[in-house]
Amino acid sequence: LVLCDVELLSTLPQENYTEGMAEVIKYAVAFDENLFETLKKGEYITEEIIDRCIDLKRIVVEEDERDTGNRMLLNFGHTLGHSVEKLSNLVVSHGNGVAVGMAILTKGCQKLGICPDGTYEELKKILDVYHLPTDCEYTAEQLVDGAKNDKKSGSSGINLIIPKKLGLCT
């Protein structure tokens, strides 16, 4: 059972509400291009958006209860985000770290031709709309070192979820 009282969102400080949008954007980039299009309009969390995010998570968790396959897609932006949080001694919050992680990964994937040109710019626009950061002061080497110790990284290396296009990650 999942209970959500959308009215409680209005009691959050703006900073916390904004950080929560990083998770909503994650669902849009990883799973649902239509949700991404909705968020591009600057719409803040509605009951329909929450329902969609819960439904997406439910589907993924039911398919992969042990977190060994598609459920890992829920970690888009998290591995580098956790690294940013750690390197900042938790000055950078989770939501902001995830936003930075999504942006860095998408920018790199675009440069490598993994996702289409313009994907990073679209993501950056939406992160900007919700006042979320897209970069950090840490070098690639520092981020990789921090990611090596992430709880989701395996003994064989760092697991990164990367976008192939908006609405589809691998």
Image (tube, helix red, strand yellow):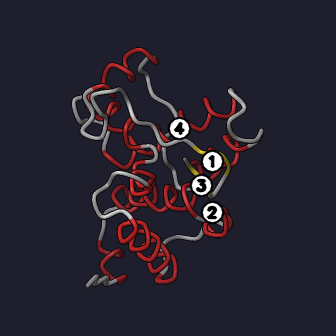
Q: Which mark identifies residue 123?
A: 1
Q: Give the SS element for disc 1.
A: helix
Give the residue type that dot 3 points to.
Val
62 w.r.t. 115: above or below: below
Nearest to the observer: residue 59 or residue 32: 59
Q: Give the SS element for disc 2.
A: helix
Rendered residue at 36%/67% (across/down):
61
| 4 or 2: tag closer to the N-terminus | 2
Residues packed near mark 2 inside 10 Å, few (<14), some (14 to 19) or many (20 plus): many
| 3 or 4: tag closer to the N-terminus | 3
| 3 or 1: tag closer to the N-terminus | 1
Give the residue type that dot 1 points to.
Leu
Residue 36 lies in quadrant = bottom right
- Measured in 3D between alpha carbons, the distance from the residue under mark 1 to the one under mark 4, in whole angstroms, is 9 Å
Q: Which residue is mark 2?
A: 36
Q: Which residue is mark 4?
A: 134
Whole-percent x and y of residue 158?
Answer: 38, 30
Mark 2 in CB contact with mark 3 (< 8 angstroms): no
Which callout, 1 or 4, points to the residue nearer the camera? 1
51 w.r.t. 72: above or below: below
| 1 or 4: tag closer to the N-terminus | 1
84 w.r.t. 58: above or below: above
Residues packed near mark 4 inside 10 Å, few (<14), some (14 to 19) or many (20 plus): many
Which callout, 2 or 3, points to the residue nearer the camera? 2
Whole-percent x and y of residue 53?
Answer: 46, 71
Which callout, 3 or 1, points to the residue nearer the camera? 1
Residue 120 lies in quadrant = top right
Q: Give the SS element for disc 4.
A: loop
| 2 or 1: tag closer to the N-terminus | 2
